Image (cartoon, grey):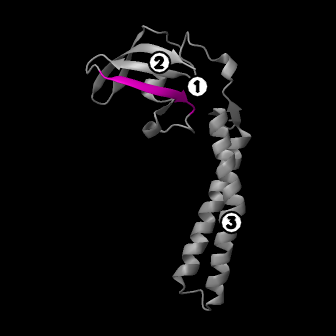
Amino acid sequence: MGEKEVLLTIAGLKKLEEELEYLKTVKRKEVADRIKQAIDFGDISENSEYDDAKNEQAFIEGRILTLEKQLRNARIIDESERSTEVVSLGSTVVLKDLELGDTLEYEIVGSMEADPSDKKISNESPVGKAVLGQKIGSVVEVEVPAGVLQYEILDIRV
């Protein structure tokens, strides 16, 4: 099976590239310096600073590998494919909760960029799946553990 495609907006791609560059240039050097200092203290067999630094180094190297893989498999969401007619990746959608009457606004993004606290939900999330391909005025149903939520699509923006 091939590696999973990672869908990103241009801003999401830039954010991953910046994190990768920071880890490779700044954090790698910081942790190498910590390891060197810990070794300079002498016996590393009972040196918690050395153990912490080695653990951080392993985490950083793992994160670098993950980011490199994601960037290798990245596909940029083509902004020209987006429209205000139907919800697509990269769309901002305004929803009305038909039970509570609340209005919600989300940007539909790939799973890598999803951040509900920043109003970015994944195209693979229950709400994301339900609204993709829908038009303004459509009512979608979203199954959640508590039951079924109904949302009306009030607006689609790019």
Residue corresponding to mark 3? 28
Q: Residue at x 56, y 13 (%)?
A: 84
Q: Residue at x 65, y 64 (%)?
A: 27
Q: Quadrant of residue 99?
A: top left
**Highlighted range, magenta:** 102-110
Q: Which amino acid does label 3 sit on?
A: Arg
Say few, some or many: other residues with alpha carbon within 10 Å of mark 3 (under 14 / 14 to 19 / 20 or more): some
- Our reading of the magenta stretch's main secondary structure is strand
Q: Position of residue 89 (x, y in %)?
A: 58, 24
Say few, some or many: other residues with alpha carbon within 10 Å of mark 1 (under 14 / 14 to 19 / 20 or more): many
- SS state under label 1: loop
Q: Which residue is drawn at 67% across and 22% down?
A: 79
Q: Where is residue 77 in the image (x, y as percent from the top left)?
A: 66, 27
- SS state under label 3: helix
Mark pair 3, 1: CA separation: 33 Å
Q: Which amino acid does label 1 sit on?
A: Gly
Q: In which quarter of the image is the N terminus?
A: top right
- SS state under label 2: helix
Asked whether the residues under the numbered discs 2 and 3 touch, taking CB atoms below 8 Å apart as contact, a structural biologist would say no
Q: Position of residue 142 (x, y in %)?
A: 37, 21
Mark pair 2, 1: CA separation: 12 Å
Q: Earlier in the sequence, mark 3 or mark 1?
A: 3
Residue 131, numbered circle = 2
Q: In which quarter of the image is residue 26?
A: bottom right
Q: Which residue is drawn at 58% across and 25% down?
A: 90
131, above or below 145, in the image: above
**Front in this rendered view, residue 29 or 70:** 29
Residue corresponding to mark 1? 90
Q: Which amino acid does label 2 sit on?
A: Val
